[in-house]
Image: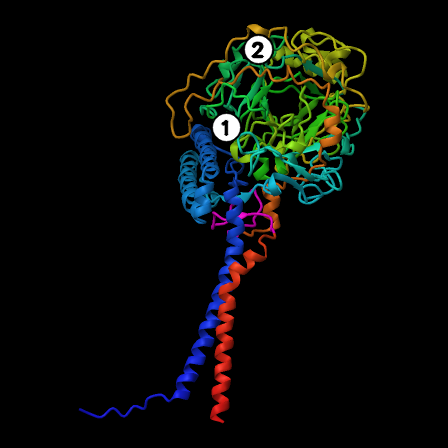
Amino acid sequence: MGRNTRRRPTGARRATIGAVALMLGGGGIVAANVYATASEGTSGQAGQVLASGAATIDCPDVGSELAAVPEGAKTEVDKELALLDKQIAEAYQKLQSSADAIRQDGAFAENSIMNPLKDKRAATIERIVGAVDAAGDRPEGLDAFAPCILRASGNQDQPENGQDGGENGDGQNGDGQGEGQGDGAGQDQGQDQGDGQDQGGDQGQGEQPPGNGGQAGNGPVAADFVDISTVQPNVSKPAAQGNASKGSFTTACGVNENGLFNSDNVIVAPGVTNGAHHFHDYVGNQSNNAFASDEDLANAETTCENQGDKSSYFWPVLRLQNGTEEKDAASPGGGIEGNAGEIVTPKAATMSFEGSPTGEVTAMPKLLRIITGDAKAFVNGPANANASWSCTGFEDRQLKDKYPLCPQGSDVVRTFRFQSCWDGRNIDSANHRTHVAFADANGNCANDFKAIPQLVQRIVYDVDAPSIADGGKTKPLFAVDSFPEQLHKPVTDHGDFINVFDEALMNEMVECINEGRKCDGADDGGNGDGGNDGGNGGGGEEPAPTEPAPDPTDGNEQPGGDDQPGDGGQDEDPADDGGNNGGGDNGADNGGGDNGGDDAPEPSESSAPPADDADQGDAGNGNADEGNGNADNGNADNGDAVKDNAPKAATSPSAAETDAAGSTGGSGADTALPGPEPAEAGGVTEPQAVTGGLAETGTQLWPAAAGALLVLGGFVLLRRISNRSN
């Protein structure tokens, strides 16, 4: 056996090796701790937002990309598009209910919510592509629309449940000009009220739930409201040319005294129960549900005084967040999907049709469908948004992304000005937009589109200004119904219309408008001056002549989307300002006429066929109570509350704006919608925030400090060894 001649290390060499090991080990600990702290800083912020519930789900809108769908594929495509909406709603509900799981496992949201949602959407989109391909040309690129992202809602800036008014004029606020609203001069400038209009302050939220707020935990919040008196006038109109059609035609169809509600949308999701995922008020046609055929609509009863108007006019209901459980509280589209509270019956609802500032109008085709506004505008961005919120007496100022706080004696007003240009061929389009358009800044229709009578829906509510300081505890917040993930934001407000005028009455309308007369449909096209206010009750009663009502027929407010032939467009000048609280605003009584009054029958549910993947069953149709929420909402004492408590609220950034601001959640997502989402989904886009204190910092950095000591100890030991050897 050979002798081992390897020399053992001397003491100096051992010490040198130990010193180097100390330095390397300490350096490794420092590096690992710095990396981990940086990662936790990002993911921790994201996790805090998710765990607080102050987040929403943002998916690219597949339907908006389908400009053309072959006739043979429409039924299948409509059902699959509705299924995409259902998948988002279900994922959002799971997100809301998973705060504890997300708090315990930072990857829970991605692994258990976002990735399964992506897989479901990918399969659904593939079926859409297959259906279109089988009947026509295969659409390309839709598979990129499968991933969704989680976004901070903007509602989380509530320290100790208080409303932090930290945003003044950022994002959409700007100069009041809505992003993506087209290039036309004179565009509706009520999109957002920034530059001093939203002063927020620290308005305490009182008993308001954390996260996204609201009775059902998904909005509204105090920052969604603004004192109308702080908003500057922002309404303009194009100059009428010599051949302008200056007349108007008003049809009186009541305020939904019959209590016809459902969560369907026969335009967007025909044949799909609960296709809207929120409840609508219906006036006019009484057969509108998901399964109504054209023949059903043509043969239906109508609440309109003139029985020649069987058109369907519908919009999301307005609710008070007062804890009331309506009959839809346990139904899809209602309480199950975050649409909770007392449904408010409008005080007045006016349906008027107006002319063009540049020439005559032509008759609308029978069964023309028009949707104005975007029910998904909070995540889609404002390109197709067309909400207009105001107060009686203040209708020369319109809000797009805020609910108004109205002073004493003033009522809340929602106004929808529909597209007034038609392609001359189609009564609908695949994305329900491209067959109609807004006029440009001068009132002209582009691309050979034809001017048609412009529908203006003006809906008035007698609701008190909410008590913002205590989060609506004293006087409840109000909000429109919405898709769950849209958080009841006011920018998502929208209106729907299906033309079912008989031909003779439509021709009377066109003649009246082109001849410059003001006509009341109840009088078969007469010359009455009161045509602008005849739709408020169903009784045809003249409004009190004490004060003039705003004239919704004077002008052409046409905020358009940039996917429409005519961008730009104009606002009307609805009033000469001041004191227009009476007269036509408050209009005729809420009963009478053909609308049933106290004898109104209970709404019936749709007789749905067996539910497929896209259906929610039959629970969504007609379950809501007859919205009787306005009876007790007098204005006698709300004036002081408006002045004392109303915030100049900071704008809640939309998802599109938050996206533009950058991502801190590690998703790598900074692409604005509409458009394909990034391939890596599941991150959280949120505003950057400074978090943590001295104790938290010490807790996170002690390993780095220990590592630094080891490095220092190794260095000292190495120096001592070096000195001894010398």
Query: For residue 637, which numbered disc appears in the image?
Result: none
Where is mark 2, residue-wise?
A: 302
329 and 163: which is toward the camera = 163
Say whether residue 59 is magenta. no
211 or 533, which lies in front?
Answer: 211
Q: Amino acid at mark 1?
A: His
Q: Which mark is residue 277?
A: 1
Query: The residue tagged with tag 1: helix, strand or loop?
Result: loop
Q: Quarter of the image for the N terminus: give it.
A: bottom left
Q: What color scheme is it? A: rainbow
Q: Earlier in the sequence, mark 2 or mark 1?
A: 1
* Residue 692 in the image, given as x and y percentages of width and height: 57, 53
Amino acid type for the residue under numbered disc 2 = Thr
Q: Which region is colored magenta?
A: 666-689
**Left or right: 223 with respect to 89?**
right
The residue at the point 78 percent across, 32 percent down is 233
